[in-house]
Image (cartoon, coloured by chain):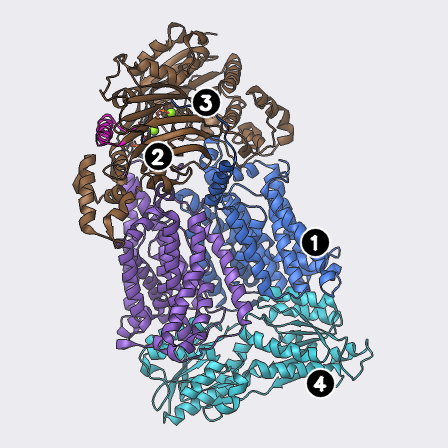
Amino acid sequence: MKPPSFRRPEASLPVAALVLTIIAFVLIPTYTDTALSSFDVYNTLQIFARLGLLTLALGLTMIAGEFDLSVVGTYALGGMLTVQAGQQHWAWGLLAALGAGAAVGLLQGGLIARLKIPSMPVTLATYIALLGLTSALSGGLTKTYANVTVTLWVDQPVLTYFSPRSLITLGLFAAAAAVLSLSRWGRELRAIGGDRRAGRVAGVRVDRLIVGTFAASGVLSALGGSLLSFSLGSANPDPGVQPLIVAAAAALLGGVSLAGGRGHPLGLLGGILAVALLAEIVAVAAVPQYVSQLFFAGLLGIIVVIDAPDLHSALVRQRTRLRPSHHPRTSI
Amino acid sequence: ACGGGSSSGGGDTAGAAGLEGKTVNFVGYGKDNPWGAYFNGVFVPKLESQGVKVVDLTTMDPGTAVTNFNQAISNKPDLIVAALLDTSSTVVPIKKAKQAGIPVLVFDGRPDPSVDADVMQVLSDSEALGTAAAQNLVEGLKAQGRNSGNLIAITGTKSGFAAQDRMKGFDAELAKTPEYKVVDIQDGNWDPTLSGKIATQLFAKYGCSGIQGAYGMADYQALPIVAAAKQAGCPVGGKTGLVVTGSNCFKVGIDAIKAGTLYGTATEDPGTIAEQTADYVIRYFNQQNPPAKELVKEERVTAENVAQFAEQCSKA
Amino acid sequence: MSATGEELVRVDDLTKSFGSTRAVHGASFGIAAGEIHALCGHNGAGKSTVVKMLSGQETPDAGAIRIGGDRLDLHSRQVAQRSGVALVDQELSVVASLTVAENLMLGDLRAGWLNRRRAAGPRLRALLDNVGLGHVDLDQPLSELGIGERQLVEIARALGQDARLLILDEPTATLSDVESEYVYAAVRAVAATGRAILFVSHRLGEVLGLCDRVTVMRDGAVVATTAVAGLTIDSLIVQMLGEAPHRLRKRTGREAEGPAEVLNVSGLSVAGRVDDFSIGLRPGRVYALAGQLGSGASEVLRAIAGLVPAATGDIEVDGVTVRPGHPIAATRAGIAFVSNDRKSEGLFLDKPISWNLLATRLPAVTRWGVIDRQRWSTALTRLVGLCGLDGKRSADSVRSLSGGNQQKVFVGRGLGRSDVRVLLLDDPTRGVDVGGRAAIHVLLRDAADRGMTVLFSSTELEELLDLADVVITMHKGVVVRRHDGDVAGPVLLREMTHGAATPAEERR
Amino acid sequence: MNVMSAPPRSDAPIRRPGRSRSRAELVIDAVLLLAVLAAIVLALTTHRFATVANAKAILTSASLVGIAALGLTLITIGGSAVSLAISPSVAAVGMIFLSAQSFGLVPALALAVLCGILITGVQGAIVGYAAANPVVLTIAASFAITGIATGVSGGSTVSPTGGGYDRLNATPGGVALSVYVLIGLALIVQWTLRRTGFGRSLYLIGENRRAARAAGLPVGRTTAVAWLAAGALFAVTAAFTAAFNTSANVNLGGTLTFDAIAAVLAGGTPIAGGRGSALRTLAGAVLIAAASDILLLRGSSTGVQILVKGVIVLVVVVLVHLRTEGSRA
Ligand SMILES: Nc1ncnc2c1ncn2[C@@H]1O[C@H](COP(=O)(O)OP(=O)(O)OP(=O)(O)O)[C@@H](O)[C@H]1O
Ligand SMILES: Nc1ncnc2c1ncn2[C@@H]1O[C@H](COP(=O)(O)OP(=O)(O)OP(=O)(O)O)[C@@H](O)[C@H]1O
Ligand SMILES: [Mg+2]
Ligand SMILES: [Mg+2]
C-alpha cells in the first residue's frame, strides 16, 4: 500500500496540522525574544515520547471502529508495575508492564469481539478499575524508581535531537506503519472499521483482529507508561484524564475518523508531533496554558462538526438545490 | 552548599543598581491552581519591577513540569525557580542543571534528599504547620473541658512531602498529649469533594460521639469536614461541638474562624512565601549570599488572632 | 457451451430454518465444471439462503455440500474460501473507506501476510479491465466510485480468487446494460476454464442468455433444474410462479378521472439512481411502483418522504410544495412512509406495540405535553382494531411479534390518522407470510377507501395484481410504463426484468 | 462513531432458540443471585454498616453524583452516549453560583441553572441537529469550559460573596437537603420520562434515531431539550457541591464525570440508549456509594474502592448486555 494520497483526510489533516505548527515554531523568534535552539527540537520530541504511544494505542482501536478509553488506565498500571516490579532490574518491571497490558487488552478485546458489546462502556469500566488497581498497588502513593542509571539513559541526548525514549517511540510508530502497510492487517483493520459486515463477508477474521488490536493497544499503552516511569524516575497512580483527552485530540488531528475505517500510523505520528510542537511553542513562548486549551477546543470542535452526518446531509441538500436541473419535465 | 551562588556570579558584571539583564526561568505551579495563581501574581511582578526577566514555564502537570524544567535548563537562564510537583521526577533535572552550571531555587516543598545539597530552598515550614494544627486541636478540646478525645485527619496527597511533613509535625505534637488519639487518617488528595465524602463516611463509621476533633490539611478540606459533620447531625464548634482545624489558610477558612465553625488554621499563604522567594532572588542576584535554605515563618491562626491574619490569608 | 462436464458441485437435501421460517428445505441440485448455473425464484424463495450456506455464512440444519466429490463442512467464510468458494453477496460487500486495490485484495487467501500491492498491480489491473473498469485507478478510494462501479469491483474481486465455485447473488441488479455485458463476458471466461458458477438473478433475459441450466426455487424448495435450451422467459415465469397467473387484473371500477390530484411529483431525480420521475396521484386509489432491486422504486419513495438529501425535483401535496430532503416537512405535509427496512428504519423493536403505533401521534395523545391516558387508550384501541392486532398484547415489545405482525404494526402507524394524505410503502409485505400479507392488503385497501392515497413498491406479481389500481413499472431508474387499465402478470414481470426492450431485442 | 451504535449489528450471529439460551440466562441469574447474597453477607458482617447513621451517610455521598447522573441519564437514554464535560461544567457553574451569592440564594441559584442550561444546551443542540459525535464534542467542550473558566477567574478560588448558600447545607429531619433534592428530582425525571410526550420521543429517538427521523419525530429538538435539562441538573449539583465546599475553583468537578457515568452504567442503562430510567440510575448511584462505604468501613484503601467500582460497572454492563441479547433471540 502506498502512503495515502494527499487529497484524503487521513493524510491532509496531519500534514496541514504539522505544517502549521512547524511554521509557528520556526517563527517563534519573530513574536518572542527567544531564539530557537536544537534543544527545543529535543524537548518537542520528549513531549512526543510522553504521549506518542498512548496516541498510537488509541488511534489503532479507532481505525478498527472501536474506542479504547482504558488506555490511560493501562498507562498508569504499566508505569506503576515498571517501578514496583523493576526495583531489582529494569527488565522485570518492563516485562510485568507489558504482560499486564497484553492481558488487559486480551480480556477487553475478547469481551468486545465475542459478546459484541460496544467498546465504550467496557473500556470505561476497565479504565476505572485499572486506576483503582494501580492506586491499590501503590497505596495511592507516588512510587519512586531508584535506578537512576535507567532514568539517565532513557533521556540522554542522542544525535542532538533525540533520546532513547523518543527513538523507541518513533521506532514503534515506524514499526506500526510498516506492519500496517506491508501486511494485510492494515487494510483488514480499516475494512472492519469502515464496514464490519462487508469485511466479514469478504473473509476477514473480524473477531481475531479486534482481539489483536486491543492487545496491541494494551501493550503500547503499558509501554508508554513504562517509558514515562523510567524517565520520571517515579510512577504516579493517577495521571488524570488529560493524557486521554490530548491523545484523542492528537489521533483525530492525525486523520483518524470518528466513524472508524480511516487512518494510518504515519498520520497519527503527524497528529501527535503537531500536538507536541504546540506544547513546546506554549512552553517557549510562555503562552498561558488555558490558551492552548482553547486552541484544542476550537480544533476539535471544528473536526467534530465537520464530521457530523446530519450537517453533511444538509450540505448535500444545499448543493443539489443549487445545481440547476436540466431534465425535461414529462408527466406520466 | 552555596555552589550555585558562586558559579553564577562570575559571568556578568553584577552591578548593584537594578537587575537589568537577569533572567529567571520560572517552573512554578500553574495558574489553574488558586495557590499558584496568587503566588505567581505576587512573585513575578515583584521581580519584573526590579528589571528581572521572568520566563513563565508554570504547569500543574508533573510530566509537563519535567519537560519544562529541561526546557529551562536549555534556555540557560541566570536562575531557575521551581516548585516540585513530583519530587522524585525532578531529581534528574536538578542534577542536569547542576552539571550545566545553572543554579536552582526550590520554593514551597522540599526536594528529594539526594539533591538536597544541589539547590537553594525557600520552604514552607510544613512541620510547623502540622504542629500548629495539633496545637489548635488540643487547645480547642481543652477549652471544651475534654481531657481525652478521638481525632481524624484528612490529608493532602500522601505521596507528597508537604503532606508527609505536616503529619510528622502533627504526630510529634500530639505525642505530647497521648490522651488525644488519632483514630483514622485518610488521603483526601487535596480534593475538597473527596475530603467531604470521606468525612461523611467517617462520621457514619464512628458516630458523632466517636470523633471529637478533625484535621483537614487545607482550609478547603477542613470546611467540607464541617459541612459533613453538620449533615451527619454532629454539632460543630461551641462548648461541646466538634473541633476542626486546617493548616493552610484561605479566605473561606478565615470567615469560618470568625463564624466559630473552624477552630483554627495556620498560615502558609502564597503571598508571604512569594514575597520571601522574590526577596531571596533579589538578594541572590545582588550577591548578598542568602543562606542555602530558608524557612518561611508560619503562624498559628485562631479566633484570638484572626484579625491579624485576615488580610494575609484572603488572597487565595 | 453445454453442461456436459462432470459434476463439480453437488448440493443434497439442504435445509435451513430461521425460527419458525423454513427458508430452505430439501434443496438439491448440481453444477458441472464449466457450467454457468442459474438460481431463480421470486423474492423470499430461499436463493440467498442457499448461497449463504454454500459460502460459509450460515450452517445448514441438514443436508450435504460436496465440491469435487468431497463432503465439506463450511462453517465459516474462511473455510469456504479455502475450499474454493468465491462469493459476490446480494448486499454490496466492499468497503468504501478502502482503495480499489485494497478491496480487490481483501480476504484473498493467496495474498498471504505480506502486502504485495505493487507486485499484484498488473493482476489487479487486468481484473478491473476485465469488468470494464479500465478508467478506474487502482489507488482511488472506493468512495469516489458510483454504486454500479463498486458492484463491479466486488465482482472483480470474486473473479480474481481462482475459485472452484464462483457464486454471484444478483450481481447485475444495480448495473447498467453496458456494465452487465462486461460481467457476462468475464463470467463466461471463468466458466471456460472449467470452474462452476452459480448465478442468482431476477433478470430472466440474462439468465437465458448467459446460463446453461436453471434451478428454480419456490417457497424454499427446488421446483426443477432445466437446461435453458428448452426454456423461454414465459415458461421460466411459469416455473417460478407455479400456475401461470394469466388472469387479467380486475379493474376496481374506480374512475380514472376523479377528485383532484393529491400528490404531484415532477422531475424527481437522484443522481445515479433515479432519472426524471414524474407522477400525479389521486385520493382513494392504490398505486404501485413495480421494480426489482436497483430499479429505483425504493429510491423514489424515500425521496418523496424526504429521506434522500441528494434528491431534486418538485413535490407537491394538495398544491403545496414540500421541501425535498426534510422528513419532518414531509410528515407535516401529510406524507407517511413505511420503509422496507423495518428493523433499522421503521420500528422501535424493544418498545411496546402501543408506543410504536402511536410514535407519530404523540401531539394528538398528549395534553400540555403530558400523556393523556384517555386519549392514548382511545387512539390505541382504534388503531389496534384497525390493524387487526391482539389488543391484549399491546404492552408487549414489537420484537416478540412475528414478522408479519411486526409489519402490520409498522403499516398501522400510518393509518387511522386524519392528517395523513399520502401513504408510501416500500415493499410492504417483504418477508411476511401469506396470512399477514392478506391482512396488510386489506389494511391498505381500507385506507384507500377512506380517501387516502396509497403508493407502494413491490417486486411481487400477485401483490401488484391483487392490490394496485395503477401499476407503474420501473427499470434501471426510469419509468417503463404506466398501466391504468388491465394488465397481465407476465407483462409486468417482463417489464420489470427487462425494461422496455421489445421481444425482438432479446436473444430469444 | 460506530462504537456507540450497539446492536442491532447486522453481522450478529444467528442465535439458535432452545436450551442453550435458557441455560445462559440461568447462569446470568445465578451469578446475579450469588453477587447479591455475597453483598448482603458482606454488608451484614461489616461493623456499623446496618445503622441509620450509615444509611444516611451512604445517601449523602450518593446525592451529588446522583443528581448529575440523573442529567446524564437523559442524555444517555436519548442516544447521545455520554457527556465527558460534566466536571468542567459543574466547576464553572459552581464558581458562578458562589460569586453571585451577593444577590441572594434564589437569584444565584436561578443564574446558576441558567448558565448550566446554556453551557450544556449548546452542546445538545449541536448533537441533536447536526448529529455530531457527542464524545468528541464534549471533549472539546471540556477544554473550552476549563480554558475560559481559568482565563476569566485567573485561576483563583471563588469564595462566596454572601451567606445564603449555607441554606443548601441544611439537614431537615437530620438528613442532608441534597438527599431530598436527589429523590425529588429522580421522581420528577422518572415521571417526565414515563408520562410525557417528550419522554416517549426521547426513548424512541434513543433506541433508533434513523427510524425516529423517518417517522418525522423532532429528533433535533428533543435531543437538545434533553441536554438542556441535563445542564440544569448539572447546575443543581454544582450549587450543592460549591455550597458544601464553601469555595469553588476550576477543579471543583473532580472526578464527577466518570462517577456519574459509572452510576448510570451501574444502574443498568445501556450506553446505546433507548432504555434506562431515573430510578435505576438512583439505584446505581446508591449501589456504588454503598460498595465504597462497605469497603471504607472494612478499612480498604481508596484504590480498592475505585477498583471495585470499575468491576461493578463492568459486570453490570456485561450482564445487561447478555440479558437484553438473550431476550432478543
Ligand atoms: N437471518 C434470517 N432470519 C430470519 N429469516 C430469514 C433470514 N434470512 C432469510 N430469512 C427468510 O428466509 C426466507 C428466504 O430468504 P432468502 O433471502 O433466501 O430469499 P431470496 O430468494 O434470496 O429472496 P430475494 O430474491 O429477495 O433475495 C425469507 O422468507 C426470509 O425472510
Ligand atoms: N436472527 C434470528 N434468529 C432466529 N430467528 C429469527 C432471526 N431473525 C428473525 N427471526 C425469526 O424469523 C421469522 C421471520 O423473520 P422476518 O420476517 O422478520 O425476517 P426477514 O425476512 O429477514 O425480514 P426482512 O425481509 O424484512 O428483512 C420471525 O419469526 C423472526 O422471529
Ligand atoms: Mg436473495
Ligand atoms: Mg428477506
Dot 2 amino acid type: Gly
**Mark-to-mark CA distance, 1 and 3:** 52 Å
Q: Which residue is mark 2?
A: C319
Q: Which residue is mark 4?
A: B290
Residue C105 placement (x, y as % from top left): 56, 30
Q: Chain of mark 2?
A: C
Q: Which residue is mark 1?
A: A23
Quadrant assignment for the C terminus of chain A? top left
* Image quadrant in which you'd find residue B238: bottom left
Of label 2 and label 3, which has the lower sequence position? 3
Are dots 2 and 3 on a single chain? Answer: yes
The tint of chain A in the picture is blue
**Magenta stretch contains residue C443:** yes
Q: Cβ of disc 2 within 8 Å of ligand 2?
A: no
Dot 3 amino acid type: Pro
Q: Nearer the viewer, residue C385 or B243?
A: C385
Disc 3 secondary structure class: loop
Are dots 1 and 2 on a single chain? Answer: no
**Mark-to-mark CA distance, 3 and 4:** 88 Å
**Magenta stretch contains residue C45:** no
Are dots 4 and 2 on a single chain? Answer: no
Residue A243 placement (x, y as % from top left): 55, 59
Are dots 4 and 1 on a single chain? Answer: no
Image quadrant, ligand 4: top left
